Structure formats: C-alpha cells, structure tokens
Image: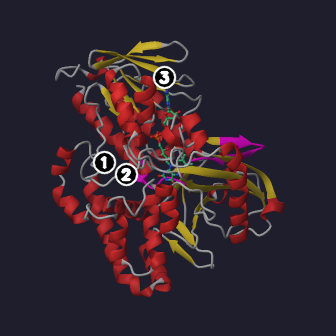
Amino acid sequence: MNNASTPPESCRVAVIGAGLGGLATALRLQAGGFPTTVIEARDHPGGRAVNEVRDGLTFCAGPPGIADRAALEELWALTGNAVERDVTLHSAAPLCRYAWPDGATFDLHADEAATTREVARFAPADLAGFADYGAIAAAQLADFRSRPGPEPFADPREVAGFVPELARAQAWRSLWSVIAAHIKDDRLREVLAVPALIDGANPFTASALLAAGHARLRQGGLWWPQGGLAALAAALMKRFEALGGTMRLGDPVRRIHVLGNRIHEIETQSGWIRHFDAAASTADRDHVWRDLLSGTLRGETMAARTRSRQHGFGLFTVHFALEGTWPGIPHFMVLLGERFRALIEDISVHGVLPQDQMIWLTHPSLTDPTLAPPGKSIFQAQVPVANLRKLPIDWETVGPLLEGRVLDEVGRRLVPDIRDRLITRFHTTPRDAMLEFNAAQGTGFGLAPQPLWRKGAYHPRRDKTFGNLYFAGAAAAPGGGLPSALAASRACATLMLETLT
Ligand SMILES: Cc1cc2nc3c(=O)[nH]c(=O)nc-3n(C[C@H](O)[C@H](O)[C@H](O)COP(=O)(O)OP(=O)(O)OC[C@H]3O[C@@H](n4cnc5c(N)ncnc54)[C@H](O)[C@@H]3O)c2cc1C
C-alpha cells in the first residue's frame, strides 16, 4: 500500500455511506480498478435523497433536483454508458421562482434572454450589474472546473496554487458584499444570495467563492430524475454493481479498527468485520471521530475539535399531498418574507425560531407525474431553522406547530383552500436528521462554510494521522449541497486513485 507499484486490484477499499456522494465516490473507485465495498446503515441507497411512499403517493426528500447534469454524465461515462439509458431527466423551468408577500415574483431561467427580460421588468437599473455579476460567477465556476476539487481547500498550502483565481473571485469578501456591489435592488440581491443558502451557507459571512453556485444553476439547469433523486441513487448503485462493486445495505458501521497510524478493519452492527486497505467516509465527520474511532487518540482529539466548529443550519421539512393540480406553481419556488438578513441571522447566529419563515417549495409532481395519481399533487416545503446546538428545543412538540404554520403560509400565498385539499402530510425535523443520518447538531448541510482565514475553513480530504482514511461527499464539503458533495467525491476519488497505486 502507498507503494508506487501496488496494482489497484489488490487494494480493497470501503466507502461508508450510500448517499449520492458515497455512490459517486464508489463508482469512480471501482471504475479505477479498486475492488470497492459500500457499507450503508439504511436498507436502501440515496442517503438524504430518499423517497417515502404513502397511499400510492411518492414523497421525495432532499434537494429540488440536480444542478450539475455534467457531473452525472461524467459518472455514467466511466461505466461506458449514457445517463439517459438509466434515468429520465426532466428539466425544471423556470429554474426557480422567487416570490414575496406583496405578490411580486422573479423567475430565474436557464435561458439567457428570458432572464434578461425578467431583470429588465423587475429591476431595470440593475441590468448591467446583473450581467457583470453573472460574468464573475461564470469565471469562478470555470476556474473551479479546471482543477479537481479546489473547494473546500484541504489546507492553507493548497490555497497558494489558486491565488489568481481567488483574487479574481474576490474570495476575501462576503458573497453578499460582492452581490451588493453590483446590484442596487434589495430583492434582486436576495435572488442572487439564495443559492448559497440552498448550499447550506450564510451569504453574509460565507466567502464570495459561493457565487459559482449561481453560474452552475444557470449553465447547467435544474434536472429532476423521474422517480426522484432516490431513483437516481438506485440507478447509480446498479451501475456500480455492474462494474463489480459490492453493496452492503442495512448494516451500520459500528467501529473502524486501527493498527498504528492506519485504519485496518471495519466492523458493522451485525458483527461483520473485514480488512480494507483504505476507506472513504461520507458519514458526518463528527460521527466518525466520536463514534467510529472513539478510544483512539486521534478520534478523541478530532471529536473535540469538530464539536467546537461552526455547524450549519438545520432543515424542517413538510411533505404534503393535495387534491387537485397546480400548473401555475412551478417545480421550485422560494417564498421570501419581509425580512431577509435579520431572518438569516436569527437562524444562523442567534438560534431563535422566528415567527416568519423562508420556504423552499418543491412541486415535483408537476415535472414528474409518476409520483402521484392523476388529479393529485405532491409538495415538499423546506424551512431553514437553527441547528440543535443553537436551538435546543423539543422538536416533538414544536414540529406539529411549525408544520401548521408552514401549511398556512403556503395556503395564504398560493393555495387558499389548502386545508380542504390536504390528502396527507408529515414532517421531518433536525432531530430526525440527527437520529437517522448521524448528522451532528441535526444540520441539513454539515459544517458551515467559513472564510479562508477562519478556524474550520480547511477540510482535509485525507486524514493526517490515519493516512488511508479519506472523506468524500457532503461530509467533505462544508455547506454540503448536492453539487459540492459530488465535486468533493470527485476530488476524493482522484486523490485516492493517485495515492493508493
Ligand atoms: C431536506 C434536505 C434538503 C436539501 N436541499 C438541498 C438543496 O436544495 N440543494 C442541495 O444542493 N442540497 C440539498 N440538500 C443536501 C443534499 O441532499 C446532500 O448534499 C447530498 O444528498 C449529500 O449526499 P452524501 O452522499 O454526501 O451524504 P448523505 O446523503 O448524507 O449520505 C450519507 C450516508 O451515510 C450513511 N451513514 C451515516 N452513518 C453511517 C454509518 N455509521 N454506517 C454506514 N452508513 C452511515 C447515512 O445513512 C447516509 O445514507 C438537502 C438535504 C436535505 C436533507
């Protein structure tokens, strides 16, 4: 191992977690010649992107789609196939509708001319600034794509190789300050800041490097896999298995055994135990240090260090089905309120549960009629909320109250007779994320992205002590939205392919 002559086929690797990030990592490793085993706690793949079927209705948890179709095409190309062979990808149009309580709306489109017309209607004085910001975001994305996984940086030395790109992106400034420098209209500023929030970051403190998210969405579009993101995960798993990869579902890793400064064996809850030459974990890092490597000096030290870092916000999600169809409610909407900055600070900084909410509303049955019988509709309303450390409330009690508030708000803004049309509803809280996914502090997106000079900004893809332990997926990318999780998986697999042979 770690010897330049080791052939990949004699190096057995494990990937912990079968979310989209874990499956993407595993497929890359298996395609690179390493016999790879994925070990997943739950009895199905998909991780956070999971479906729940109730009374013939399919409810899809997770993001409103995938903004990085190219990442999927790249993965399928590694298997010698086209993604379209396994998954039908529907494009969502508009990409997103932003709506305010007074009825104002702004539609962001993949089509350049349509977006320009929308800016001209909504904030004509910002036409030039919007184009300038778009150019900055596009240049940043091109810089990122030219190298594998520059974000997040693994350590300060890695930054040295990116100085011109960082200077171009004005990485030392907050995302909001760069947006505000180009855009005068407050609401258009909100439009440009929301993608960072949906990537798990506070746009007022996170670096301007997050502008790339705007370009990714506009260039790549928003794609909904038929059957939901869980169907995409199932297709990815099938391709991985067809390459010879091994899946072990429904058997959580309980312990990673070490020998000196290497991880040596992985033991699961069922008592299964195997030697691996290396492992990539996509499980929450806190969980790895605190639970899987407890009793080791490194595990204890890192558990204490990770605990003291800034975690991102949590997500409260209401899934509901309605009688009737709403062709006027697009695939994805963001319902903004009267407050923006103060609301984000309440959630990210002060840890309060405000009266008002920002709602990310996904309407997948519009794009994918396979999810609900004719004449019925499926919705997912996500509300960013403070994580469990900032807001240690009893979600068992608060959950039903907040669910009612979210439904009332959707009713007020979009479906006045929502209460009469409800077929079913249920919700998930940060507490569920903690219990079901071992997510520290119940966050939806793991650690909060930090500016480069702050503690917690660097996230090694390979552990410093256990040199054969790697990190991939959202666990390796603070913020941990889906595009970042897939990019982090690519960077991790590239590093493993380089260092393990
Ligand atoms: C409600 C919600 C909404 C979201 N919205 C967006 C959005 O709008 N845009 C966006 O880009 N992203 C969004 N995300 C984030 C996105 O879903 C994740 O970034 C992405 O799915 C992460 O994939 P992953 O494979 O890296 O991690 P995960 O999907 O978290 O997978 C990790 C896996 O590890 C498993 N695991 C944990 N511990 C163990 C163990 N001990 N042994 C074995 N397995 C273990 C878990 O069961 C899980 O399956 C959202 C997430 C949620 C929950």
| Dot 2 amino acid type | Pro
Looking at the image, which residue is at 36% across and 18% down? 276
| First-in-chain label (2 vs 1) | 2
Q: Nearer the viewer, mark 3 or mark 2?
A: 2
Q: Residue at x 68, y 71 (%)?
A: 413
Tell me: is circle 2 under 8 Å from ligand 1. Answer: no
Q: Which mark is residue 449?
A: 2
Q: Which residue is mark 3?
A: 253
The amino acid type found where label 3 is placed reads Val
Q: Which residues are magenta?
A: 52-73
Classify the position of the N terminus by image quarter.
Answer: top left
- In the picture of the structure, the residue carrying the numbered disc 1 is 457
Q: Separation of disc 2 and disc 1 at Cα?
A: 7 Å
**Left or right, residue 494 beside residue 51:** left
Q: In the shown orientation, is residue 171 left or right of residue 233?
A: left
Label pair 2/1, CB-CB below 8 angstroms: yes
